[in-house]
Image (spheres, grey):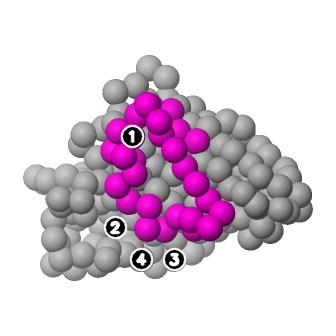
Amino acid sequence: EAGVVQSPRYKIIEKKQPVAFWCNPISGHNTLYWYLQNLGQGPELLIRYENEEAVDDSQLPKDRFSAERLKGVDSTLKIQPAELGDSAVYLCASSSLEGELFFGEGSRLTVL
Amino acid sequence: AQSVSQHNHHVILSEAASLELGCNYSYGGTVNLFWYVQYPGQHLQLLLKYFSGDPLVKGIKGFEAEFIKSKFSFNLRKPSVQWSDTAEYFCAVNARGAAGNKLTFGGGTRVLVKP
């Protein structure tokens, strides 16, 4: 069974440029998460989807971040415009009904 | 709001030594508890989980954790570590409730095992 797939693995951009990350969750997992992980810290939740509905986006900086999961499967996370402080690893995860999260390999963003 | 605290940011030990990583959480309700591991250059992987039943749970690679409800703790242990256990370990809590799954992570403990 394929795991959570994310792309790109690495992205380097200049500040004020836009960037987008894509995630394909495990088949059959209705819940999808985007987490932010800064170096030396634990993952922090940005947004959680139940199917196509964003049920928890309280930690998403909505002035520059947006996310969508139009058909309840794949999801994209966008930052526009990116700032230096956005440099981090963006993790996508999906969960089974039991609540165990399965993570992708992450997308490492470097903003110059 | 729930929070998770991991006591040590860095642990250095030699092979064959015993390992114990502390984890405490703050949440008054029913929880699911997890330990995830992140090996260098790899994604987060589940080590073990506790949902209910025996509070001593065994995971992969010889790890175990004990849930002590009265202490709001879920400490991770391994009797004898190997060099390959060098990784970062994250404790996580999922507060069970009407809002659904919301996994909150601790800050992580970076473990270095010297050969």
Q: Quadrant of the C terminus of chain A?
A: bottom right
Mark found first going from the N terminus, 2 or 4:
4
SS state under label 1: loop
Mark found first going from the N terminus, 3 or 2:
3
Contact between marks 1 and 3 (CB within 8 A): the answer is no
In the image, the segment drawn in magenta is A49-76
Spatial separation of the CA atoms under disc 1 and disc 4: 32 Å
Q: Position of residue A43 (x, y in %)?
A: 53, 61
A109 and A103: which one is in front? A109
Circle 1 or circle 4, nearest the eye: 1
Q: Are marks 1 and 3 on the same chain?
A: no
Corner quadrant of residue A31: top left
Q: Which mark is residue B5?
A: 4
Spatial separation of the CA atoms under disc 3 and disc 2: 12 Å
B90 and B97: which one is in front? B97
Mark 3 is surrounded, within 10 Å at the Cα level, by few (under 14), some (14 to 19) or many (20 or more) other residues, namely some
Spatial separation of the CA atoms under disc 2 and disc 4: 11 Å
Q: Are marks 2 and 1 on the same chain?
A: no
Give the residue type that dot 2 points to. Asn
Circle 1 or circle 3, nearest the eye: 1
Q: Is residue A61 magenta?
A: yes
Q: Are marks 2 and 4 on the same chain?
A: yes
Spatial separation of the CA atoms under disc 1 and disc 3: 38 Å
Circle 2 or circle 4, nearest the eye: 4
Q: Which mark is residue A79?
A: none
Circle 3 or circle 4, nearest the eye: 4
Which residue lies under the disc numbered 2?
Answer: B75
Give the residue type that dot 1 points to. Glu
Which residue lies under the disc numbered 3?
Answer: B8
Q: Position of residue A110 (x, y in %)?
A: 80, 56
A42 and A12: which one is in front? A12
Determine whether A62 is above or below B26 in the image: above
